Each structure stands twice: as structure tokens, then as C-alpha cells.
Image (cartoon, rainbow, N blue to C red):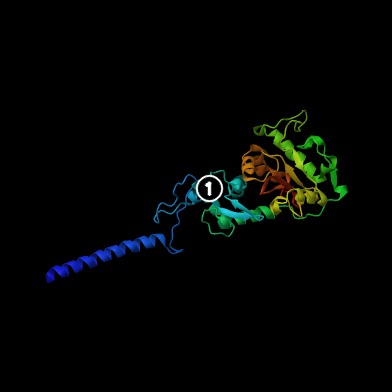
Amino acid sequence: MKGFRVHVAISFVALAMLLAAVLLDAGTSRGQSKRDAKPVVREPGLKRVLKSSNEPASPAKRNALLSTELNWTFGGKPQRGWYLYKPLISRLLNTKNDVASDSFASALARWQKKSGLMPSGVLDEETLYVMIAVWQDARLKDRSPAQPSQLLTAPISDFYDPTRAEELRQVERETYAAYKRMVSAAIANKSLGLARGAKVELTPGEKYLKIISAFRSREYQDKLRRESPNSGSAGLAVNSPHFTGRALDLYVGGEPVDTRDSNRAVQVETRVYQWLVQNADRFGFRPYCYEPWHWEYVGRNKQGRRL
């Protein structure tokens, strides 16, 4: 009888130890420390990116995920992913490779190292904000309002809206000359399929690259802000570059100036927009990354090279 009790006691202790081990393992898998945890990240379509703690996602896989899932803010507006900026990012990295490729990750790592960032090859929030700072820094610096003598009234044929009032068709003189040179170059590029008139100009029926908006007075800008109170600083700036007459909103597809992601997604995929990303700088124009249609004339530097 005594031996039976000892056997039962040993069996009970073994069972308790086994149960404790199971509970400890379960608790560890649910309550890992932040340092050791391997988050379960899912791509659209619920595909697991990190299948286990022993299978970390490659930079290419993380870029594929972050391009649509990264949460960040711009101008006080929540943003999701950076897919809308792929043409600008590709130009900055000097690569034509897909964002989900190892080649893209390698090009990104080289740019990160050059920019003083950890060369992870992953386009995370920190890297994205550095890129945005580069684009923003390249924009028009002097936003002094244009004087009447600096402006000319462009013909209605250059505008997207054939009924646009004369006072809303003013453009700074150097900017207009650069715009006409850029349009001529775009027309000469047959891959864009732009309708050409008798001269090297866009036909009245061609919408792409027509001017939507140019010079705006402060009073007119204030009117636009009153009409769109939710636009925020990203959409309608208080100190707008349009005051200078050197900012042009150009038609690049979709709804002309609609900042919804669905509309911008259409615009950044058009051949005309992608041509501008690659070529506008040759004519002195720089982009406003948040608005695919917005381009600012920054001119040339003292050596005569385009900025």
C-alpha cells in the first residue's frame, strides 16, 4: 500500500510539471517582450509575412507590405502606405525595379546609407519622412507675391477650362516660357500620345498638360479655403506658392485637383505624370509630392544647369 501511494504521488507531480510547462509555453507565445516579439504582419489578402519567429520578412517583402500599409501623416492628414509616391521614389533612387524586388531594396539601401540612415533596404516611416524632406526642400523658396509687371495673361488655349476668366489666366513670365518649352518636349515624345496642332502646341481638345490654375491672389486663395474648409495645409496653403505666379497646376489625369487617394492613384499611373517626374526638372519645375498636378518653377542655378 505504501508503494502504491509513492507511485501515485510521483505520477501526480509529473503530471503537474507537464501541465506547468504547457501553460508556460502558451503564456510565452502570447506575452512576449517588445524586444523579443516577432509581430504577425499580414499582406492584403491575409497572407502571413512572418510565418514564425525564425522566418523574418525580407526587405523586399516588407516593402511590398509597407507600400500599402504604412501609417503616417502629412499636413495633418493620416496617410496609409506610400504607393502614391512610387514614381517620385523610383526617380530619387534611380531605379525602375518593382518595390517588391530585391533590386529595389538594394537601391534603397544605397540611398539610405548616402542619406545617413541605417541601410536596411526597408522603406519605413523614418526613411519616408527623409524623402519627403528632400522633395519639400527642392520646392520654391521665395514666395513673394508676384508684381503686376512680372505677370502675363496666357491664352485660353493653354488652359484646361476653356471658359476660365482672364484674371485667372495670369502666369509669371519666365515660368510661362519654361512651361511652353516643356510642353513642346512632351509633344515631341510620341509615346505620350498627345494631340498636336499645326504648330508644336496642344490641340484645343487635348487636356493633358493644360494649365488648371496658375497665379492666385491672396483674396482668391482665401475664397478657395472658405469653400473647402477641410482641405488643410496639405491641400490649400495659407502662404500659397500660387501667389508667386510660378506654381502651375497641370492636368495629369483623373479629377483635376482631387486629393482623394483613389484619384491620385489614377494620376500617378498616367504616362504624362510619370514623364513629368522624369523630365520636368530639365525645364526648372519641381513637384509638390502630395499633389501630382502641382509643379513649381524654381529656375536655373548660376551655372546654367537645371535645378
Residue 229 in view (yes/no): yes
Q: Residue furthest front?
A: 1
- Left or right: where does residue 193 sit relative to residue 95? right
Q: Secondary structure at mark 1?
A: helix
Residue position for label 1:
104
Amino acid carrying label 1: it is Phe
Residue lying at 47% horizontally and 52% vertically, measured from the top left: 41
Query: Which of 191/27 is in front?
Result: 27
Q: Is residue 255 above or below residue 306?
A: above
Rendered location of residue 230, percent (x, y): 70, 51
Rendered location of residue 140, percent (x, y): 74, 52
Rendered location of residue 94, percent (x, y): 59, 47
Query: Which of 80/270 is in front?
Result: 80
Residue lying at 62% horizontally and 47% vertically, measured from the top left: 88
- Left or right: where does residue 228 sit relative to residue 32? right
- Left or right: where does residue 74 sit relative to residue 151? left
Q: Residues within 10 Å of mark 1 (few under 14, many from 20)?
A: many
Rendered location of residue 19, percent (x, y): 29, 63
